Image (tube, rainbow, N blue to C red):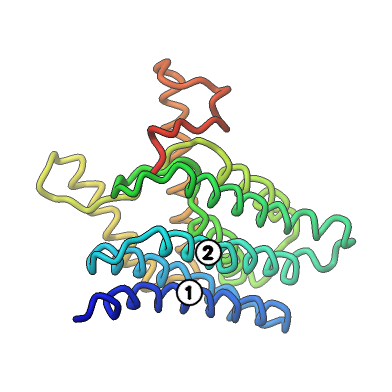
Amino acid sequence: MHPRTTAMIPSTFTFLNLFCGFFSILQSIEGNFHAAAWLVVICAIIDALDGRLARWTGAESRFGLQLDSLCDIVSFGLAPAVFMNQAVFTPLHPMIGIPLSFLFLFGGAYRLARYNVMNAETEDHEYLGLTIPISAMTVTTFWLFQNAWFGSNPLLPWFFIAAAVPLLMMSAIPYNWPKVNFRTDPWQSVKSALVLAGLCLALAFPERTLFPMFCIFIASGILQWTASIARGEESFFSLFIADSRRES
């Protein structure tokens, strides 16, 4: 395959991510919130694929990194922010709803900028701060979760979501992607089995299980960071101070 053709493959997925994010914004504006929420999840799946395709095809580049970030701020920053404003905060006064929605976009832009500046172009599985795709899906799947279980979306929990998720993105709390490996120690095998069980539940009952799974992932990072403080390895005051040696 021609090198230029190879390089176009991950970029095509990146632009598809951008299109789905743009389409999600349109659906939110038109009041089709269920479709808008799922389009953000689809964006995250595509975003995961384009990065892997770039590595598999050897097409990683600075252009691809910048293009991916620009598309991500639309799909995982602007789209969820518009979704929150339209689906949740519309009953509020604009002076309340708009700043709450914008806070998510602000946190996402900060997270992406920090990632780009500190990115070492490695395949390390540790990230500082909650990644913007996980943050975006946490927002939209919370809406799906509440509607699936309760048939409504009470306003009060959204104030916490709108404040906590952006702060987690801007934080220096380390997050590790779960890895499936049954060839190491027994505890890793147990964790791998739990990850696979979670994936099966997510495929079978996505609207009822995705949000709780993201909450477990978020809590795992907070607990690890808290344990590091207890061991004297971290300071509470380093919560928003990222060490460039650890970012990836």
Residue 192 to residue 200: above or below: above
- Residue where numbered disc 1 is placed: 17
Q: Residue 18 location, x and y as percent?
A: 53, 74
Residue 139 to residue 22: above or below: above
> Which picture quadrant has residue 1?
bottom left
Q: Tell me the SS state at disc 1.
A: helix
Given residues 198 and 101, the one toward you in this image is 101
Which mark is drawn over residue 72?
2
- At 29% from the left and 69% from the top, the residue drawn is 53
Given residues 46 and 232, the one toward you in this image is 46
Badges 1 and 2: C-beta atoms under 8 Å apart? yes
Q: Residue 107 location, x and y as percent?
A: 63, 49
Which mark is drawn over residue 27?
none
Q: Residue 237 location, x and y as percent?
A: 58, 22
Earlier residue among tags 1 and 2 = 1
The kind of residue tagged 1 is Asn
Left/right of residue 96 with respect to residue 153 in the rendered view: right
Residue 174 to residue 43: above or below: above
Q: How many marks?
A: 2
Left/right of residue 73 with respect to residue 105 in the rendered view: left
- At 40% from the left and 74% from the top, the residue drawn is 11
Left/right of residue 75 with respect to residue 93 in the rendered view: left
The kind of residue tagged 2 is Asp
